[in-house]
């Protein structure tokens, strides 16, 4: 997702190029994601966290004993992170001169509508993962795209999250708007997401030199991919 995508956001404070409200994400707490990641990787594994935002997941991963390098294209997001090296960069062009035990790309960033951007994200993952390492992705399974309808949920701490609008302008494309309300503050986030079934994701991983190695959760939201071994 870059500024050229139709993703956009409104509300108080800085908004990232992909439409996320920094002040909203800075106050969110983890909801089990760090435990899923930590349980899936070796103790002390080094992690490259792509799209780290304000460090909601970075902090607990550091507390679990991982070295984390946090990447985001938003300096305002990264300003909230302490204790980890931060790199302000688009994911798609990231080229650090090192590899990591684990590359983490969560928060459904991989569901970007633009196929070329998706390919570029996966190439970045491959470029930065050790041959013996793993790439962990959090994506929406195809059935989520097929069945999602407007909803409202209590996001904890007095926060309300609503999906207020859904359109399906093309097959496999979902355009939705989220509304987040905290007290008298209100943000919206319009995003576009592409439905990719497991076979399609495996194909794109293959193009990037990765292979699908299974799922971390029963809902198939969390994917493990490994560097493809030479045949
Ligand atoms: C939905 S937020 C999630 C942040 C964090 N992973 C979390 O769970 O709290 C997505 C983050 O990814 C970043 N992001 C999205 N597309 C990006 C790109 N192409 N390059 C760099 N950062 C990107 C945004 O700036 C934002 O901070």
Image (tube, rainbow, N blue to C red):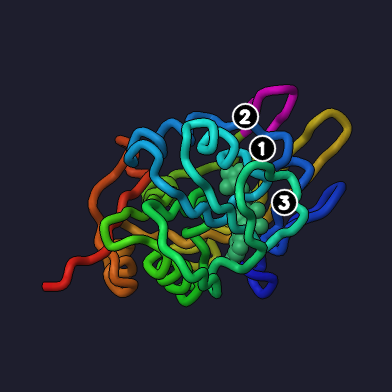
Q: Quadrant of the N terminus?
A: bottom right
**141 above or below 114?**
above
Q: Nearer the viewer, residue 120 or 37?
A: 37
Q: Which residue is mark 1?
A: 162
State whether label 3 is within 8 Å of ligand 1. yes
Q: Which residues are magenta?
A: 152-162
Give the Cα distance between marks 1 and 3.
Answer: 22 Å
Q: Residue 159: x and y, percent? A: 72, 28
Residue at 79% across, 31% down: 182
Res. 120 in view: yes
Q: Quadrant of the C terminus?
A: bottom left
Q: Residue 9: x and y, percent? A: 75, 55
**32 above or below 56?**
above
Which SS class for mark 1? strand
Q: Nearer the viewer, residue 86 or 173?
A: 86
Determine whether, in the image, residue 112 is placed left or right of residue 218: right
Determine whether, in the image, residue 152 is placed left or right of residue 116: right
Q: Which residue is mark 2?
A: 153
Q: Residue furthest left?
A: 231
Q: Residues within 10 Å of mark 2 (few under 14, many from 20)?
A: few
Rendered image quadrant of residue 208: bottom left
Q: Which residue is mark 3?
A: 77
Which SS class for mark 2? strand
Give the Cα distance between marks 3 and 2.
Answer: 24 Å
Question: Is the Cβ of the residue at disc 2 closer than 8 Å to that at disc 1?
Answer: yes
């Amino acid at each position: 997702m870059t500024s050229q995508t139709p993703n956009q956001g409104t509300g108080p404070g800085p908004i990232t190029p992909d439409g996320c409200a920094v002040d909203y994400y800075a106050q969110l707490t983890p909801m089990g994601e760090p435990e899923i990641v930590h349980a899936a990787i070796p103790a002390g594994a080094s992690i490259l966290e792509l799209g780290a935002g304000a460090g909601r997941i970075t902090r607990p991963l550091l507390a679990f004993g991982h070295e984390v390098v946090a990447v985001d294209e938003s300096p305002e997001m990264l300003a909230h992170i302490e204790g980890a090296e931060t790199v302000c960069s688009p994911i798609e062009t990231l080229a650090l001169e090192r590899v990591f035990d684990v590359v983490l790309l969560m928060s459904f960033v991989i569901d970007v509508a633009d196929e070329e951007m998706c390919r570029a994200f996966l190439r970045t993952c491959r470029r930065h993962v050790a041959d013996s390492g793993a790439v962990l992705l959090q994506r929406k399974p195809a059935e989520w795209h097929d069945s999602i309808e407007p909803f409202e949920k209590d996001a904890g701490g007095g926060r309300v999250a609503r999906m207020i609008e859904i359109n399906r302008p093309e097959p496999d494309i979902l355009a939705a708007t989220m509304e987040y309300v905290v007290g008298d503050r209100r943000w919206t986030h319009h995003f576009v997401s592409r439905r990719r079934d497991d076979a399609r994701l495996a194909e794109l991983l293959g193009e990037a030199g990765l292979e699908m190695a299974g799922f971390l959760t029963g809902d198939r939201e969390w994917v493990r991919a490994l560097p493809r071994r030479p045949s």
